[in-house]
Image (cartoon, rainbow, N blue to C red):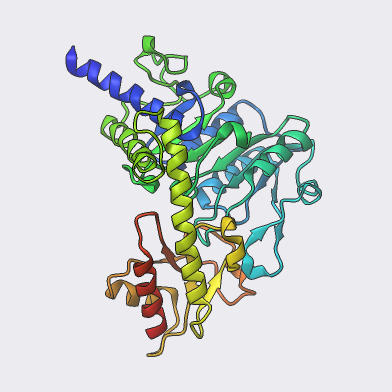
Amino acid sequence: YPSGKLVDESTWQARQAMADLLGCTEEEVVFGGSMTSLVFNVAEALRVDGRVGPSDNVVLDPMGHGANVWPWVRLAEACGAEVRWLPFGGATEAECVLDLRPESLGTVIDKRTRIVAVGAASNGVGTVHDVKAVCRAARDLSAGSAVSFVDAVHFAPHSPIDVEAIGCDFLACSPYKFFGPHCGVLFGRAVHLAALPVAKLRCSDEGLPRPENCGMSRWELGTQNFEALAGTAAAVDYIATLGARFGGADGTAPRRVRLDAAWRVIAAHEDELKRKFLSGAAGIPGLQLLGVTDVSRLEARTPTFAIAKKLKGGGSSASELAEKLCAQGIWCTAGNHYAGFWESRSRGSIGNDVGMARLGFLHYNTLDEVDRVLAALEEL
């Protein structure tokens, strides 16, 4: 009937949109309630498949969001496997960067590695990681036995994603981070999505999305949130319009072409936002930042900043700083942001349970707004 056909069409359109955004095929797109639930689903499928055993190891990102850490820790504990961590690097702890040189990756990834999970960018401090190097090492150093999983939630609203160029087996993101509705999206290589055992009803289709099964995936449990899928497609279309309006792309060009143009103009503008904030922050007495602060390395971070400051009126907690900024109409969060690297990167001055205040800029923010934030921080 007509309304049912419209749902089928909009569901497939959402798959097409995410395929364009991620550089994959429609059948390799999985929708879910959240990125977190999708990671747990993949981890459970790998456990049931017997991919991880007592003599194996999983390698994780010490700066990762908990959603790309704890499902794998849980898997390792259930299978008796060792948990290893990608090594930190950088000139100082406060830079919050990983050492992803081949020789360093070779100290943690070996032929017994079964999972390598890494974030494309830190949601806590904005550091961008070379996930292509990590995924290549996962493949080469494990002799093909490791599965690579990339958390692109924080990265997705700032930069283009090409899963073929990255070389990952799985990648997850959240549309609400790139201006869409609350749901989760998973890319998985078709060979894995078709073969891994998944929790599903017996009556559910065993295949990957295709017209004959209403475009649904064996990885998607129950009726999907069709409203969110329609919103996800609209969010991708919004980004593509930026490529036509501001990036010089032809408005009739394929969506992937318009998206590429959008990411170029977004990167150029966000670089200016980053440069202005970092330059201004360097002159504010008592303002502490974690993450890359060198304005000659803007590509190494997103415009998300972890900050701390002793307030003039007393108080220095992350929550107090965030409250003061919010009171001035500058929305700011505070906490550990579901990450556990704060103590090690601050030489113990910041507790893992406390974290820092966090400010984030996006392509729709202006340089004047950055000035307003800097003025508020200096006054506080």
Q: Which of the two residues, 46 or 123, is positioned nearer the viewer here?
A: 123
Residue found 66% across the figure and 69% down from its top: 93
Q: Is residue 205 above or below residue 47?
A: above
In the image, taking residue 1 as reference, residue 8 lies left or right, namely right
Q: Which of the two residues, 242 or 184, is positioned nearer the viewer here?
A: 242
Residue found 72% across the figure and 55% down from its top: 99
Residue found 58% across the figure and 77% down from its top: 349
Residue found 41% across the figure and 35% down from its top: 258
Q: Quadrant of residue 116?
A: top right
* Residue positioned most to the bottom: 313
Quarter of the rendering occupied by the N terminus: top left
Q: Position of residue 262 (x, y in %)?
A: 42, 43
Q: Position of residue 17 (x, y in %)?
A: 39, 30
* Residue positioned most to the top: 212
In the image, taking residue 243 as reference, residue 100 lies left or right, namely right
Q: Quadrant of residue 209?
A: top left
Q: Is residue 349 above or below residue 80?
A: below
Quarter of the rendering occupied by the C terminus: bottom left
* Residue positioned most to the left: 2
Q: Is residue 155 above or below residue 324?
A: above
Q: Position of residue 266 (x, y in %)?
A: 44, 50
- Does residue 286 show up? yes
In the image, taking residue 362 as reference, residue 299 lies left or right, namely right
Q: Is residue 31 above or below residue 207?
A: below
Q: Position of residue 131 (x, y in %)?
A: 63, 44
- Does residue 336 show up? no
